[in-house]
Image: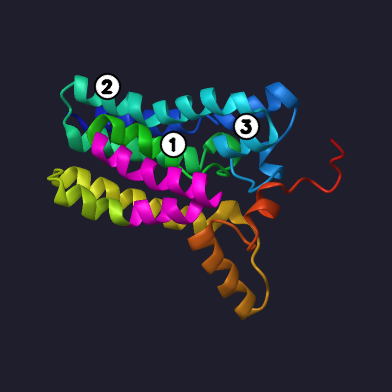
Amino acid sequence: MSVVYTILIFLSGYLFGSIPTAYLLGRLIRGRDIRHYGSGTVSGSMVYEHIAHWAVVPVGLFDAAKAALPAWLALQLDLGVGVAIAVGILAAIGHNWPVFLHFTGGRGLSTFLGLLLVVFPWGLAWILIPLAIGYLFFKDSPPFALFSMVTLPIFTFLLGGSAFVVWGTICMLVITIVKRLEANRRPLPMDAKGRRLVLLRRLILDRDISSHADWINRRPAASID
């Protein structure tokens, strides 16, 4: 495979992942910039909370397809599982840091699920089960999502996943941690103790404050609807 061809494939994966599905639907349905609501992430969860419950379905499916479709195409073109995983990872990076929204995006979980569906379906179940437990029994899924991502490389290795897949899950974990801490460049407290506390909450809880309900229900100060 030529260098130019490889670059084009990888660039296409990133650009496809950069399509801000949640943002576009928020603008289309309610005229809202979803980045100013709740967690501020361009994600299906914020569409569910602040745009329309039903809209989470098309957003979630499209966000998963961002990685699933390029990875599937790479396999169909006999480019190998390594290229399939790489292009899926780049789609997730595009989702998290989309060029079309000045690099403010989502968390990448849906795109990870789409990629795993194609290259390692057991990993899909490994992530979804803890998420379901967190949501159904604790109404707070981010800590469970982190647990699933931290343990996913071990689970993949134990189930005989290829080295490409194991390294792919490690990349997913790194992207997850970086995005949680970076948090779409939200400012940190000025004092050192406050910064450490907020960074710890971002890492474990995926938010800046303790209350999950208060965090996801945030609205712009001028909002009256």
Residue 173 seen in render: yes
Residue 202 as seen in the image, left or right of residue 118: right
Give the label on residue 73, or none: 2
State which quarter of the image contains the N terminus: top left
Choose the circle earlier in sequence order: 2 or 1: 2
Determine whether 65 is above or below 138 in the image. above
Residue 98 as seen in the image, left or right of residue 161: right
Choose the circle earlier in sequence order: 2 or 3: 3
Give the label on residue 153, or none: none
Q: Which residue is mark 3?
A: 23
State which quarter of the image contains the C terminus: top right
Give the label on residue 110, or none: 1
Q: Is residue 144 magenta?
A: yes
Label 2 – label 3 distance at C-alpha: 26 Å
Residue 104 lies in what quarter of the image? Answer: top right
Report the residue at 39% width, 48% height from top. Answer: 130
